[in-house]
Amino acid sequence: MTEKTNTRPPKRGPMGHGMNMGEKANNFGEAIKRLFGEMNKHRLLICIGLFLAIMGSILSIFAPNQLSKLTDKISEGLIINSKNMEKLSTEINQNFYSNSLKDFEIDGVNITVHSQLEFIEVMKDVDKEANPKEIYKVIDELPDEIQEVIKPHMDMSAIKKIVIFLVTLYLCSALFNFIESLCMTDVSNKFARGLRSRISKKVNRLPLNYFDKHQTGDLLSRVTNDVDTIAQTMNNSLSSLVS
């Protein structure tokens, strides 16, 4: 008597077993509703993770604004103080053409009459379209008090404050994202462990004829691949959604 064999090809899914590629839930809305219901016991960690993800995103968005301020401060320290230069030229020209040269102050620096005359002498041959290299060379020939007023000055105190604030922003953002990742990893792992435990109990209650009618690969895929997919989605979706 010849033994009867099953010639029906096994179901093949991703990685050679499990659900068919592209298989969808029969009722997606109900599945999501049930998923949120299952996650209700972890709502505290989820709320903490959601709050930290929002804060991390806000800080990472706010940081480029501080980078812009830092760039502006550094740029100001590399060019001539045009505001003081204009003020100096205007004051000297007014005094010169009114034949009443006198001392005056700019930013607390006293500009003497002698320095004003030297300024007029040095700057009279400077072309308005001269390149920065020529202008800086001319400035080096001006009196010390005038150089102090118009020479580039790097405000290291302001730059240091912006840098410290910027580093704090990035560190806080990274810390918030790290803690949020830990929270969601803990939630997803606990959820996956509980789900596997319930699946195991369910499998042990199934009658023997169920295993005769279903492929072993399908059962293994439910316990491993499907649960892992849910856990990974829970772990990654929150931060991605907030971002």
Image: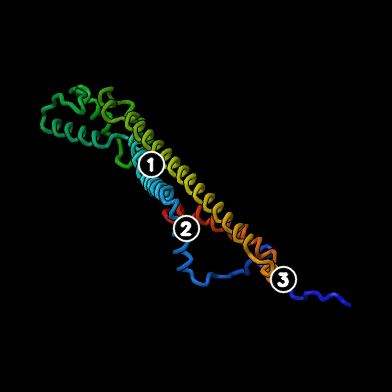
Discs 3/1, front: 3
Residue shown at 43% from the left, 55% from the top: 40
> Which quadrant of the structure image shows residue 13?
bottom right
> Which quadrant of the structure image shows residue 152?
top left
- The quarter of the picture where the N terminus appears is bottom right
Label 1: which secondary element = helix
Label 3: which secondary element = loop
**How far across and down, in percent of the image, does residue 26 sit?**
52, 72
Q: Is residue 12 visible?
A: no
Residue shown at 16% from the left, 32% from the top: 91
* Residue on which the image places disc 2: 38
Q: Amino acid at mark 2?
A: Glu
> Which quadrant of the structure image shows residue 201?
bottom right
**How far across and down, in percent of the image, does residue 93 sit?**
17, 34
Q: Are marks 3 and 1 in contact (CB under 8 Å)?
A: no
Residue shown at 44% from the left, 40% from the top: 175
Q: Nearer the viewer, residue 78 or 114?
A: 78
Sequence-first tag of 2 and 3: 3
- Residue 206 lies, with reference to residue 57, above or below; the image says below
Residue shown at 35% from the left, 41% from the top: 66
Q: Amino acid at mark 3?
A: Pro
Sequence-first tag of 3 and 1: 3
**How far across and down, in percent of the image, does residue 193 sit?**
56, 51
* Residue on which the image places disc 3: 10
Alpha-carbon distance for marks 2 and 3?
A: 33 Å
Local packing at callout 2 (Cα closer than 10 Å; few below 14, some 14-19, many 20+) is some
Label 2: which secondary element = helix
Alpha-carbon distance for marks 3 and 1?
A: 59 Å
* Residue on which the image places disc 1: 67
- Toward the bottom, the furthest residue is 1
